[in-house]
Image (tube, coloured by chain):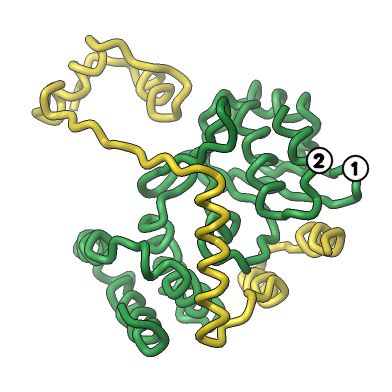
Chain colours: A green, B yellow
């Protein structure tokens, strides 16, 4: 059982998060996609997520299933899970559908977990960086630097262009340029 | 545009709560001037958890090599607070982890 796996993995936050997410995914019949900071951490290895964000549409039966698994439904689509070692993790479903493509992690022979694809995650972080704050800019730079060797930059550029043409006032191209300028000052792209 | 499929059914399909019959899919696609032949399979990359862990370790090394330390969760919580998001429970949860 995924939650039993997560219980034993207190020393390894990343694996614990993956199995916690898988447990929730089981509860809602394999429809969840891991996104947000926990997904960023899969590429940077040094991001400490404050919560676990997943995308899925939840109805009353899904919420009930999560409660039966051991999650506490604090409010709306927000859940909590307290491990036996005292760690408290928050699980949130901020959106019903993932904004982008998905890849899969093979957790074990029988278990897979859907996660937002790296390039879509970069676009998501660039969207956050359109707010112009130092925090979102630095987080986007960190992800791009950490994953610069494995990212399909042509795909990212094309997607930024596509979205910018749909919503030119958002400043996505500008955020993309600012972030990549900083990334290029640190690594070879 | 009318698909001949009820809104409730479309909502269930969109939210992954129901799988459409082929005949339903054909009706929906027809609304967009498409057919089944226009659907391209979108191969999903599958990676092992070991590959993910190795990738995360490589990412952390690259960040360290260019002088970018670990991200600061407190800074992120402050960013959320500036947006009027209640982060009380997140702070409490973070305090339970080493």
Both labels 1 and 2 in a single chain: yes
3D distance between C-alphas at marks 1 and 2: 7 Å
x, y percent for residue A49: 66, 61
Crowding at dot 1, Cα within 10 Å, few <14 / some 14-19 / many 20+, comes out as few
The residue lying toward the viewer, choosing from B28 and A38, is A38
Looking at the image, tell me whether mark 1 or mark 2 is earlier in sequence order.
Answer: 2
Instruction: Indicate the secondary structure of the residue bearing disc 2.
Output: helix
Q: Is residue A160 left or right of residue A148?
A: left
Instruction: Indicate the secondary structure of the residue bearing disc 1.
Output: loop
Q: Is residue A180 above or below residue A152?
A: below
Q: Chain of mark 1?
A: A
Crowding at dot 2, Cα within 10 Å, few <14 / some 14-19 / many 20+, comes out as some
x, y percent for residue A14: 66, 53
Count of numbered labels shown in the rendering: 2
The residue lying toward the viewer, choosing from A163 and A21, is A21
Given contact means CB atoms under 8 Å apart, are the residues at marks 1 and 2 in contact? yes
Residue at 61% x, 70% y is: B83
Q: Chain of mark 2?
A: A
Q: Is residue B92 above or below residue B5?
A: below
The residue that disc 1 covers is A84
The residue lying toward the viewer, choosing from B56 and A164, is B56
Q: Residue furthest bottom?
A: A185
Q: Is residue A127 above or below residue B45?
A: below
x, y percent for residue A180: 34, 79
Q: Residue furthest right?
A: A85
Q: Is residue B69 above or below residue B42?
A: below
Q: Which mark is residue A7?
A: 2
Residue at 33% x, 75% y is: A176
């Amino acid at each position: 059982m995924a939650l039993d796996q997560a219980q034993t993995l207190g020393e390894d936050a990343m694996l614990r998060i993956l199995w916690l997410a898988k447990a929730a995914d089981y509860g809602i019949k394999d429809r969840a996609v891991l996104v947000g900071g926990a997904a960023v951490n899969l590429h940077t290895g040094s991001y400490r997520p404050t919560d676990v964000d997943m995308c899925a549409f939840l109805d009353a039966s899904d919420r009930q299933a999560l409660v039966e698994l051991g999650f506490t439904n604090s409010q709306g689509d927000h859940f909590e899970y307290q491990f036996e070692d005292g760690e408290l993790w928050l699980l949130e479903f901020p959106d019903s559908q993932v904004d982008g493509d998905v890849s899969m992690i093979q957790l074990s022979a029988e278990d897979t977990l859907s996660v937002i694809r790296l390039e879509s995650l970069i676009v998501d972080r660039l969207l956050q960086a359109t707010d112009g704050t130092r925090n979102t800019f630095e987080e986007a730079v960190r992800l791009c630097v950490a994953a610069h060797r494995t990212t399909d930059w042509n795909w990212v550029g094309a997607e930024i262009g596509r979205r910018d043409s749909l919503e030119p006032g958002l400043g996505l191209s500008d955020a993309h340029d600012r972030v990549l300028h900083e990334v290029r000052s640190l690594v070879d792209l | 545009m009318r698909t001949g499929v009820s809104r409730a059914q479309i909502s269930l399909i969109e939210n992954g709560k129901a799988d459409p019959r082929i005949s339903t899919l054909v009706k929906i696609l027809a609304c967009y001037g498409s057919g089944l032949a226009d659907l391209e399979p979108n191969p999903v990359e599958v990676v092992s958890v070991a590959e993910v862990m190795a990738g995360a370790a490589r990412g952390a090394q690259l960040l360290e090599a260019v002088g970018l330390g670990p991200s600061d969760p407190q800074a992120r919580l402050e960013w959320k607070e500036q947006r009027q998001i209640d982060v009380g429970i997140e702070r409490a949860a973070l305090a339970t982890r080493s």
